[in-house]
């Protein structure tokens, strides 16, 4: 069992029994402590029992951090500092192991679901929180204390054969709730044990994640489809599927041929990849080190050695070392190797987009455990936390909203509910039905064809595009441009329903691809979808239409959702030394507030307060030269939408 220390913060949780500490700039927002004493404000978490177990046989405990390690009584909502004196429950003694207290006693923190009034738990603002849910038996946690050394608690360690929690089925919800909002998720990082569902309601917001099939259906499908290397992950006696590196039968060299090929190719060639908000990196192998620099500011990042399979799958060792930007690149590599997203057929120096989900889990070897759980037939919208860095490019089961109102946890998941519509549909640009005549198709660096030679006023139409239900949709466009100021617009039925405009950035070349998007509200139906060049000088490879999980406050016409009124927001330079420019585009005139916030959630400066801005690009400089180095945020409020973005002061 592992001692949980208050200064060691995982990007989603306190250090887990199986993962190394990682502190990444792009992930810190998910796990910011609330700092200071417990605030009165709480959130209600409703627990719905859709499982095979009665409420009498379901146990709930809540642990987290509010100025120190605490536990919340699920029956009363009372917040209690962890103390050794809480260890009063006798636990199993296996192989003579009496636990950390050497007395076989564990924390009296679990309560039966049947004893929780209305199955509703109230939890205050808290960091590193876990709602632990076990079946047929409580778990046996050991509390070390609230603060000091030792402090925290010892969690289940199923790798230890004498752990008192052997044979106890459990799941958890991880969350942080502070002044910047709520972040919560289910997790499959160590194992899948039982279906779970998680739903969050907020101000004009709704999202759900979780499993769509019953426990037996998931186990049966695994048994019928898992490749030979992954068959041993199923523990039939426990009714669980373990993460590959937690199973002794899994090949310890599973990824080694792929890793060796990556290191071999890029000794003589250059790998260039897009990491999303952290920029474009290019690098090559020197010795066994993979050394990268970032376009724009020449920031350096290093992978200090060639990883083995364990390190690549868990994000440990050489893929969990060094400084902030080292770990950003290392996280990208963990995700890219897991998903087989590094394409060894792409020529040296050509940009690879690790965020292109169409390339994930297509070429062997890849982590089949992750692919299996990401199937849309198993997980809502294909989202789940199947490995430590599944949040890279937003593939995890994380839900975030700045204004949470209500949370529902469903034991047993969503089995029996109506199947969701397809998560997205991708339309290749060259498959247009009609076009204005001047455009041409050409070979695309990402494979297949793209449409190019687009001039102002050009248009293309795609017939029979179905929006299966009324609601908000995200439309993504895969575009490239070598000029500034390019823009496109979308509409339905020859312009009778306008969907809005999107700015296209200068990507540095006609085959340097990026993805832009906006959110629109459309009534269910089948339409002719039009793309119009408001300003030319861009190429398009594909467009993707996906159902979003946020509601729009009851709007019922095919107009741009209010969240799409603001596009292409960014801070530059980022990181910055003294002055940073905060830029954003407005499609329509709106009142806007703009604030800078520090890592504690405290307001540092107000640049705008409900100021009416016209449509167009807006840039506001901010002088941060008198502030200490570290992570900051800027918060944009427009209409009923609040969005928070990260920036780093060097």
Image: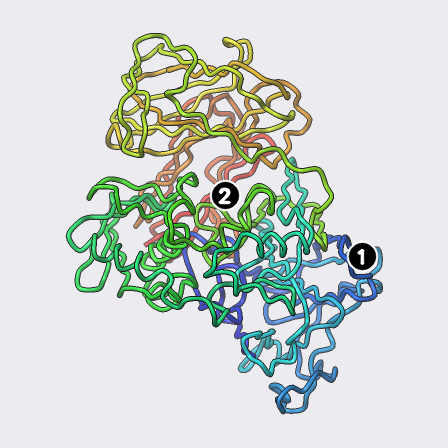
| Residue under the image location 41 percent in, 10 percent down | 434
Please say whether residue 464 is visible from this viewpoint: yes
Helix, strand or loop status at disc 1:
helix
Q: In which quarter of the image is residue 356?
A: top left
As drawn, 189 above or below 611: below
* Quadrant showing the C terminus: bottom left
Q: Residues within 10 Å of mark 1 (few under 14, many from 20)?
A: some
Discs 2, 1 touching: Cβ within 8 Å: no
Q: Where is residue 468 in the image (x, y as percent from the top left)?
A: 62, 25
* Quadrant showing the N terminus: bottom right
Q: Position of residue 99 (x, y in %)?
A: 62, 86
The residue singled out by tag 2 in the image is: 644
Question: Which residue is more in the foreground, 331 or 602?
Answer: 331
- 150 relative position to 619: left or right: right
| Residue under the image location 53 percent in, 28 percent down | 519
The residue singled out by tag 1 in the image is: 119
Q: In which quarter of the image is residue 309?
A: bottom left
| Residue under the image location 52 percent in, 52 percent down | 602
Label placed on residue 134: none
Helix, strand or loop status at disc 2:
strand
């Amino acid at each position: 069992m592992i001692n949980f220390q208050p200064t060691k913060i995982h990007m989603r949780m306190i250090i887990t029994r199986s993962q190394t500490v990682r502190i990444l700039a792009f992930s810190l927002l998910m796990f910011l402590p609330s700092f200071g004493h417990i605030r009165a404000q709480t959130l209600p978490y409703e627990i719905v029992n859709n499982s095979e177990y009665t409420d009498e046989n379901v146990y709930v405990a809540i642990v987290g951090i509010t100025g120190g390690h605490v536990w919340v009584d699920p029956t009363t909502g009372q917040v209690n500092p962890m103390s050794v004196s809480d260890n009063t429950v006798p636990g199993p003694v296996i192989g003579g192991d009496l636990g950390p207290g050497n007395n076989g006693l564990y924390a009296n923190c679990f309560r039966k679901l049947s004893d929780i009034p209305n199955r509703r738990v109230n939890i205050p603002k808290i960091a590193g929180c876990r709602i632990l849910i076990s079946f047929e038996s409580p778990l046996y946690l050991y509390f070390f204390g609230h603060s000091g050394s030792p402090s925290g608690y010892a969690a289940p360690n199923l790798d230890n054969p004498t752990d008192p929690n052997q044979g106890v089925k459990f799941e958890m919800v991880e969350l942080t709730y502070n002044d910047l909002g709520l972040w919560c998720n289910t997790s499959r990082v160590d194992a899948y044990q039982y279906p779970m569902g998680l739903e969050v309601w907020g101000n004009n917001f709704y999202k759900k994640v979780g499993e769509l099939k019953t426990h037996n259906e998931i186990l049966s499908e695994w048994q019928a489809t898992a490749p030979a290397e992954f068959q041993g992950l199923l523990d039939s006696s426990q009714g669980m599927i373990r993460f590959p590196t937690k199973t002794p039968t899994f090949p310890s060299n599973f990824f080694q041929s792929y890793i060796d090929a990556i290191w071999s190719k890029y000794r003589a060639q250059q790998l260039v990849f897009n990491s999303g908000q952290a920029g474009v990196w290019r690098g090559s192998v020197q010795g066994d080190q993979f050394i990268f620099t970032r376009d724009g500011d020449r920031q350096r990042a290093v992978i200090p050695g060639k990883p083995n399979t364990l390190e690549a799958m868990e994000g440990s060792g050489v893929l969990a070392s060094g400084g902030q930007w080292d770990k950003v690149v290392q996280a990208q590599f963990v995700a890219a190797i897991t998903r087989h997203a590094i394409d060894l057929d792409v020529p040296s120096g050509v940009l690879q987009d690790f965020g292109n989900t169409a390339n994930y889990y297509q070429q062997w070897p890849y982590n089949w455990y992750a692919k299996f759980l990401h199937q849309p037939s198993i997980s809502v919208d294909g989202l789940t936390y199947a490995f430590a860095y599944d949040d890279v490019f937003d593939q995890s089961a994380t839900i975030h909203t700045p204004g949470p109102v209500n949370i529902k946890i469903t034991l047993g998941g969503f089995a029996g509910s109506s199947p969701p519509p397809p998560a997205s549909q991708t339309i290749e640009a060259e498959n247009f039905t009609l076009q204005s005549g001047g455009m041409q198709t050409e070979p695309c660096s990402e494979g297949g064809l793209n449409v190019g030679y687009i001039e102002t006023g050009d248009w293309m139409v795609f017939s029979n595009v179905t929006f299966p239900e009324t609601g908000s949709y995200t439309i993504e466009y895969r575009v490239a441009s070598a000029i500034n100021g390019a823009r496109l617009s979308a509409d339905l039925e020859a312009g009778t329903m306008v969907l809005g405009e999107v700015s296209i950035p200068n990507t540095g070349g006609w085959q340097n691809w990026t993805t832009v998007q906006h959110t629109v509200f459309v009534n269910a139906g089948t339409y002719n979808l039009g793309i119009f060049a408001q300003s030319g000088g861009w190429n398009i490879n594909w467009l993707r239409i996906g159902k979003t999980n946020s509601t729009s406050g009851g709007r019922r016409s095919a107009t741009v959702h209010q969240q799409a009124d603001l596009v292409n927001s960014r801070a530059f330079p980022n990181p910055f030394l003294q002055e940073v420019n905060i830029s954003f585009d407005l499609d329509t005139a709106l009142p806007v507030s703009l604030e800078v916030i520090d890592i504690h959630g405290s307001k540092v400066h107000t640049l705008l307060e409900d100021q009416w801005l016209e449509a167009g690009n807006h840039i506001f400089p901010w002088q941060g030269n008198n502030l200490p180095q570290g992570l900051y945020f800027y918060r944009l409020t427009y209409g009923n939408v609040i969005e928070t973005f990260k920036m780093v002061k060097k």
